[in-house]
């Protein structure tokens, strides 16, 4: 009898790791997963301080914020929120905006059909609380920045949880078809703006603009107040013009979706070079102190990742000895290799226990 494959919720028909079968295009919208640690501070533009899949954008400007996995939430439906706090202000109306962003992979944007004559609208819903009252902006744009749409939130009351729902009309412009449509590249950039510049602001809301615009002229300059806080949770982007209940995924499901973009050997929720190291077996090769071994990633990653490692040691049966040279390279989306030398002297082909910290980064 022939076997019939049945794909689970969240799997695509070809059993890839994309999330096209779920209604929420956002990964980790309930802020459950924080592989890098429960708190951290952005040191530059495009930095992921803490909560998986949410990064800090400053466009090269001075503004910086810390991210924290907070238990301050609007109701019992959510356990965690992302808490952002201004650590370095940017008070000038220059070319630099500030935002909290998630980049949606091209494979996952496919259900919207943007760039075609049958483009669908999508609706974003989220809970937000901020210490700075006023109007904020949410933007969506193509990866190249050539098309964008900006929406305004209602005027938010300070230190009060508010649910916001905004509908973005579908874009029939063909620019999307030439911007990683149906690939593992940048499919859609979503940003919650917390600053305002004179370069990327607009007075056009609810329709597509043929340029890179990310904020409203009415946007509050949250980034100009040291210590200002901004909480976010329950982020959902779904097809259609109606917001439905938030799609809760299990922690295990959400973690696997996040690991497509970032994974590590060190202890969950700690810095990548803290906690328990990965241990395993390497085989010696060539010279008497050369070692080689594979590392398998927990899920198929978006692309062969950039690797970093530290704390790499070999064990000779009684003591751990550090290697003098370690070369880490990602061969595929599924595994990498560690080529080590300068450790314990052994004969060619002998096995040896090793330990190291590593992380693999394939973020957009």
Image (tube, rainbow, N blue to C red):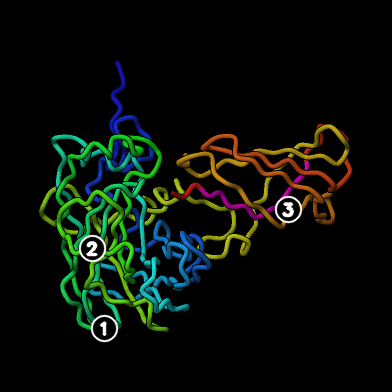
The residue identified by callout 3 is 312
Q: Label 3: state its secondary structure.
A: strand
Residue at the (84%, 56%) spot, across then down: 319
Measuring from the top left, give residue 296's x and y in whole percent: 57, 40
Task: State how far apart marks 3 and 2 are (Cα).
Answer: 51 Å
Find out whether the residues at labels 3 and 1 contact each other: C-beta distance under 8 Å.
no
Measuring from the top left, give residue 192's x and y in whole percent: 30, 64
Residue at the (56%, 49%) spot, across then down: 360
Q: Quadrant for the N terminus, please.
A: top left
For residue 233, side relative to residue 324 (left or right): left
Our reading of the magenta stretch's main secondary structure is strand
Q: Label 2: state its secondary structure.
A: strand
Task: State how far apart marks 2 and 1 are (Cα).
Answer: 27 Å
User: Residue 202: which numbered mark, if any?
Assistant: 2
The residue identified by callout 1 is 159
The residue nearer to you, when weighing 76 against 219, is 219
For residue 100, side relative to residue 164 (left or right): right
Measuring from the top left, give residue 316's x and y in whole percent: 84, 49
- Residue stretch rendered in magenta on the structure: 352-361
Find out whether the residues at labels 3 and 2 contact each other: C-beta distance under 8 Å.
no
Give neighbour class at mark 3: few <14, some 14-19, many 20+ (Cα, 10 Å): many
Foreground disc of the pair 3, 1 = 1
Task: State how far apart marks 3 and 1 are (Cα).
Answer: 46 Å
Foreground disc of the pair 3, 2 = 2
């Amino acid at each position: 009898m022939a076997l019939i494959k049945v794909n689970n919720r969240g799997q695509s028909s070809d059993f890839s790791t994309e999330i096209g079968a779920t209604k929420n295009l956002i990964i980790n919208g309930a802020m459950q997963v924080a592989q890098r640690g429960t708190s951290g501070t952005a040191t530059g533009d495009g930095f992921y301080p803490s909560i998986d899949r949410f990064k800090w954008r400053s466009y090269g400007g001075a503004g910086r914020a810390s991210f924290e996995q907070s238990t301050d939430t609007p109701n019992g439906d959510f356990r965690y929120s992302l808490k952002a706090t201004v650590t370095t202000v940017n008070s000038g109306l220059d070319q630099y905006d500030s935002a909290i962003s998630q980049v949606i992979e091209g494979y996952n944007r496919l259900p919207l059909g943007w760039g075609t004559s049958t483009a669908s609208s999508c609706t974003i819903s989220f809970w937000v609380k901020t210490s700075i009252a006023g109007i904020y902006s949410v933007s969506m744009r193509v990866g190249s920045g050539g098309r964008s749409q900006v929406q305004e939130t209602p005027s938010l009351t300070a230190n009060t949880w508010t649910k916001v729902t905004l509908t973005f009309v579908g874009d029939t412009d063909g620019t999307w078809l030439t911007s990683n449509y149906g690939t593992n590249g940048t499919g859609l950039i979503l940003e919650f703006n917390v600053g305002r510049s004179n370069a990327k602001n607009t007075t056009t809301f609810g329709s597509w603009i043929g340029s890179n615009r990310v904020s409203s002229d009415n946007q509050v300059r949250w980034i100009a107040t040291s210590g200002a806080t901004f909480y976010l949770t329950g982020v959902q982007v779904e097809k259609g013009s109606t917001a439905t209940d938030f799609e809760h995924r299990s922690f295990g499901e959400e973690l696997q979706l996040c690991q497509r973009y970032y994974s590590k050997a060190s202890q969950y929720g700690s810095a990548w070079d803290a906690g328990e190291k990965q241990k395993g077996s390497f085989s010696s090769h060539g010279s008497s102190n050369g070692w080689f071994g594979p590392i398998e990633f927990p899920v198929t990653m978006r692309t062969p990742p950039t690797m970093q490692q530290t704390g790499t040691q070999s064990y000779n049966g009684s003591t751990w000895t550090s290697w003098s040279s370690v070369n880490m390279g990602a061969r595929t989306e599924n595994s990498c290799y560690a080529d080590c030398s300068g450790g314990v002297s052994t004969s060619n082909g002998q096995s040896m226990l090793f330990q190291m910290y590593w992380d693999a980064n394939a973020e957009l």
